[in-house]
Each structure stands twice: as structure tokens, then as C-alpha cells.
Amino acid sequence: MRIVMAGSSGLIGSDLSSRLISDGHEVTRLVRRPPKSAAEVRWDPAAGGLDPACLEGADAVINLCGAGIGDRPWTRRRIDELFRSRLDPTRTLAAAMRHLDAPPKVFISQSGAGYYGDAGQDFVTEESPAGAGIMARICVEWEAAAREAPPGVRVVTPRSAVVLSRSGGALGRLLPLLRAGVGGPLGNGRQYWPWITLPDISSAFAFLLTSGLSGPVNVSAPQAADVNTLVAELAAALHRPALLRAPAPALRLVMGKLADELLLSSQRMEPALLQGDGFTWQHPSLRVAARWVAGGS
């Protein structure tokens, strides 16, 4: 397949593009700087700038754009950036496709588990309603922007879980603490974090390229885990204690509303459509995933 990818420099994009190329696909990367090779095309999503010709003959478009959720405090300016960094690229890609007589057959545009807000202890599937909060609003608008793709394009909006990797990503700050033996659960630890390993999320995106699924798809591991369990399994795999709990009031004092939405909210997400369509996980259980994160196979 010939695949055009936006957001290829991030954690998921880097791993996914390498995987797709190794699988024999041709990947064209959209970049905001001068291109360094024939496999790169410059665009300006903030201004809606993308030559539709670069999508001519493409089989699929993958959109992974978006500023980091937990990288900076949630000021009004930062919240606006979180919206714009997702909506502008998505709308630009959809608009470019509408200019083509034969647009790509598939548009995979990332969304997130934040769509469900704080769902407590209830399982959430793709049929569950949107929750409340900033992340839920972002995801609702993000998915709506993807649906602006022209008729005939199979639009998939993966609601991605927390990605477990050996470095960086959502655990970029927690893992070094756990390795040093000074980490621990966040809040009461009973909130559910949907999770998936980096190899498995790349496999899931590759799977969605050729599956018949469309619309929202929960992309998480099949085993649900609360934060107490997740931290305990990671610490055990690292052979370290995890006793230093960070209480919710302290997290809110330091991080403001970001703490409630990113660390303390609960999404007990079930990947119902992936399971029903026969997707196979390399790391289906948290214990196996934690061993991989710690450096095992």
C-alpha cells in the first residue's frame, strides 16, 4: 500500500512508520519543515496548506497529529493549542481528499480514551456515550473533523489507550521513578487506565488499514487494570518497591485540572471491535506487558 502519514515523528508515528515500511508498504511523511528526502512532503496544517496532489494514488492516510496532553500546564493558551493541533491537521487532510476524484480508500485519524471522560468503574465500549471534560470535548470534535472526509472513504477513529513503552510516552516520567524505587500509585489508585504496548498499538493501526472496521475503535489491551495494579506489575517487573503514593490533593495542587483529566479519571475500556474482528495482541496481559517494558521479550 502507499500510505500518507501525518504525525510520523511522535512515539506512535515513528514506530508505526518503521513497521509499515518493514512490511513492504510505501510511507510518505507529511512534515512542517523543508523535506529531507523524496519520502517527505511539506505542509502547513495550521493554515490549511496541503497540495491535494500528494494524496493522489495513496491507498490510505494516517493522521497522528496532536500536541502532547501532559507536556505543559493547561493554561487557556495550551488548551487552545491542544484543540488546534488536532483539529487543524484533520480538517486539512479531509479537505485535501475532497479535491480528489479518487480519494484514498481509508482515513485513520487518531482519537483517544479521553472521549469517555471519567467513566468510573463501568466498562466502556465503542457504543458508550462521550463523557464530560476538556479531553472528551477535544475527542468529540476531533472525530467529527475526521468524518468530513468525502463519501466512500472508510473513516476509522481509534480511541487510543495509554501507550506503554520502554522510554517516553505517557510513562516517561513515572518509569524513571519506578526504576529508582521511589514511585507509586497516583491518587487512590482505583481509577482504570486503559493501556496498550507500543508494538501492539502499531500492530492495531496496521490491522485497521485492511480490516472492515470503521468509525470509533477502542485500541487498548484486552485486560483492564486499575492504577494500583498497573504500577504494582511494572514495579514487580523492575524488581523495585512502589510504596510512595501521590495523593490526589497533592496532584491537583501541582497540576490543576490536568491531574483530574489525565491521572485521576477512569476509563475501563473494552476493545470490543478489535476482539470481534480477530486482532491478536503480542502483550495481552499486564504481566506480559510489564516484562516487556522492563526489557524482557
Image (cartoon, grey):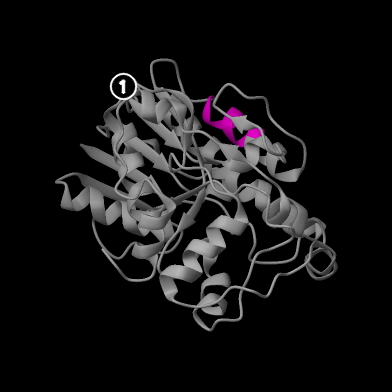
* Residue 19 in the image, given as x and y percentages of width and height: 24, 52
* Residue 105 in the image, given as x and y percentages of width and height: 32, 24
* Residue 87 in the image, given as x and y percentages of width and height: 60, 41
Q: Which residue is nearer to you in this view: 15 or 113?
A: 113
Question: Quadrant of the rendered structure where residue 69 is?
Answer: bottom right
Principal secondary structure, stretch drawn in magenta: helix
Question: Quadrant of the rendered structure where residue 39 is?
Answer: bottom left
Residue drawn at (20%, 36%) of the image: 1
Residue that sits furthest to the bottom in the current view: 180
Q: Which residue is nearer to you in this view: 277 or 90?
A: 277
Residue drawn at (71%, 39%) of the image: 120
Question: Quadrant of the rendered structure where residue 97 is?
Answer: top left
Q: SS at mark 1?
A: loop
Residue drawn at (43%, 43%) of the image: 221
- Which residues are drawn in magenta? 140-147
Image quarter (top left, top right, bottom left or bottom right) of the C terminus:
bottom left
- Residue to which mark 1 is pinned: 102
